């Protein structure tokens, strides 16, 4: 079985890489530290390339691009630490609408995503549901405390409690009845906000909220793993470039075994993560029953790869690697933030074990 991407998909990857290298510079990433909306122009330009239509059905503005293409977008976005709302929009809210199978809601909201609007998924991403806003059948009141890219989203899919105390998913415009509060975060690539709803008009999705949440988390785990893989490759490339340039005792430091072995270890972990990511991408695209297991494995492997690559990138740069002027910090902060975005490594390890036990029981 061949899990590799097709020639057309590889061409798309090259086009995305060229776009990211041109439009998403390190200066833009640093701008996003102080201005969470710094990447909006790049997001609009990416939408003009057709990226905002990925995984959307043709009757909702899609153009035949599926899960594999979105995985490529995730990888290239991670490579440059793109501060773009692609995960919140395409990897979370769009997936919730697709999994819900609510055709009326899809016809209403998905074309807006295809047109380039940013959206978000206002629900706990770590599987732990605490305090939720209340939905009375027409309006939403209360708060969602940790919403990815909530500052730029124009609408949101929100997990709420209905009048009977049960969980439900609703969709609403983030209009003037919604108060947005930017939260202090260490990673500019994953900005989060608190959303307070004051009688916001909303429409309930006709779906099982628990089933949709599980499906969204599994799909987002795959996309996030590809993003982490791309970031790990980016950190490795930065370390290799510096090792070739920096000289000690008349030789590039990359010529010494102490550096060679470190970078070889980073490369090995990255390639191991790539294998898991490719398998998960296949499982997602094929809607295979192995998706739960594959998504958890990819998430664990990619988290480990990025964490190690970010650390060794700093070590390769030596004392300079810890300074604000060097970009090593950007990869390190992103490694820490992305590792807990969808729940920590232990949570996904438990999910992997449960999936394997279930498979063995069958």
Image (cartoon, helix red, strand yellow):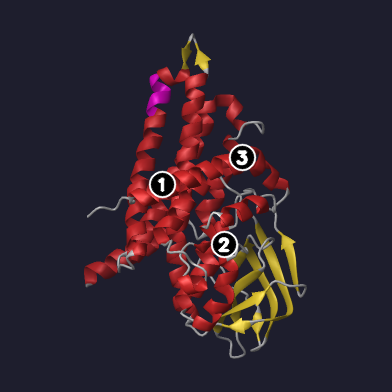
For marks 3 and 2, give the one nearer the viewer.
3
Residue 11, compared with residue 161, is above or below; it is above
For marks 3 and 1, give the one nearer the viewer.
1
Task: Give yes or no for contact between labels 3 and 2 (Cβ–Cβ under 8 Å).
Answer: no
For residue 342, side relative to residue 26 (left or right)? left
Q: Residue furthest right?
A: 176
Residue 348 in percent (x, y) is at 42, 60
Residue at numbered disc 3 = 25
Residue at numbered disc 1 = 11
Q: For residue 88, which numbered disc appears in the image?
A: 2
Gap between marks 3 and 1, in whole Å?
22 Å
For residue 177, side relative to residue 207 (left or right)? right
| Residue 61 forms part of the magenta stretch | no
At x 25% / y 52%, what residue is drawn? 2
Label 1, secondary structure: give it: helix
- The quarter of the picture where residue 288 lies is bottom left
Q: Residue furthest top?
A: 250
For residue 322, side relative to residue 224 (left or right)? right
Residue 308 in percent (x, y) is at 45, 40
Residue 4 in percent (x, y) is at 31, 50
Residue 191 in percent (x, y) is at 64, 55
Gap between marks 2 and 1, in whole Å?
25 Å
- The one of 117 and 212 positioned closer to us in this rendering: 117
At x 66% / y 38%, what residue is drawn? 27
Task: Answer with mark 3 or mark 2, whichever residue precedes in sequence.
Answer: 3
Check disc 3: other Cα within 10 Å, few if <14, some if 14-19, many if 20+.
some
Label 2, secondary structure: give it: helix
Q: Which residues are magenta?
A: 256-261
Residue 189, compared with residue 56, is above or below; it is above
Q: For residue 167, which numbered disc appears in the image?
A: none
Gap between marks 3 and 2, in whole Å?
21 Å
At x 38% / y 36%, what residue is drawn? 267
């Amino acid at each position: 079985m061949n899990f590799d991407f097709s020639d057309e998909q590889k061409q798309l990857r090259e086009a995305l890489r060229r776009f990211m290298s041109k439009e998403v510079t390190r200066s833009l990433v640093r701008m996003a530290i102080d201005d969470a909306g710094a990447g909006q122009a790049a997001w609009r330009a990416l939408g003009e390339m057709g990226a905002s239509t990925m995984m959307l059905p043709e009757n909702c503005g899609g153009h035949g691009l599926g899960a594999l293409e979105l995985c490529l977008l995730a990888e290239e976005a991670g490579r440059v630490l793109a501060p773009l709302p692609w995960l919140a929009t395409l990897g979370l809210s769009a997936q919730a609408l697709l999994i819900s199978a609510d055709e009326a809601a899809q016809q209403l909201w998905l074309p807006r995503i295809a047109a380039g609007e940013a959206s978000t998924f206002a629900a706990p991403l770590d599987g732990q549901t605490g305090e939720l806003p209340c939905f009375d059948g027409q309006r939403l009141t209360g708060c969602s405390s940790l919403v990815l890219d909530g500052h730029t989203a124009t609408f949101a899919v929100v997990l709420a409690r209905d009048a009977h105390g049960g969980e439900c998913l609703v969709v609403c415009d983030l209009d003037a009845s919604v108060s947005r509060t930017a939260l202090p975060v260490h990673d500019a690539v994953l900005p989060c906000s608190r959303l307070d709803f004051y009688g916001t008009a909303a429409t309930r999705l006709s779906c099982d909220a628990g089933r949709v949440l599980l499906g969204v988390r599994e799909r987002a785990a795959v996309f996030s793993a590809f993003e982490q893989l791309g970031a790990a490759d980016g950190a490795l490339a930065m370390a290799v470039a510096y090792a070739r340039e920096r000289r000690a005792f008349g030789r590039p430091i990359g010529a010494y075994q102490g550096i060679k072995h470190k970078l070889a270890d980073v490369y090995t972990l990255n390639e191991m993560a790539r294998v898991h990511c490719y398998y998960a991408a296949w499982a997602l695209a094929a809607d295979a029953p192995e998706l739960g297991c594959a998504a958890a494995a990819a998430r664990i492997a990619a988290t480990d790869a990025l964490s190690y690559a970010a650390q060794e990138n700093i070590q390769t740069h030596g004392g300079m690697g810890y300074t604000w002027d060097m970009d090593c910090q950007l990869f390190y902060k992103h490694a820490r933030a992305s590792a807990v975005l969808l729940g920590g490594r232990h949570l996904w390890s438990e999910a992997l074990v449960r999936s394997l036990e279930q498979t063995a029981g069958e």
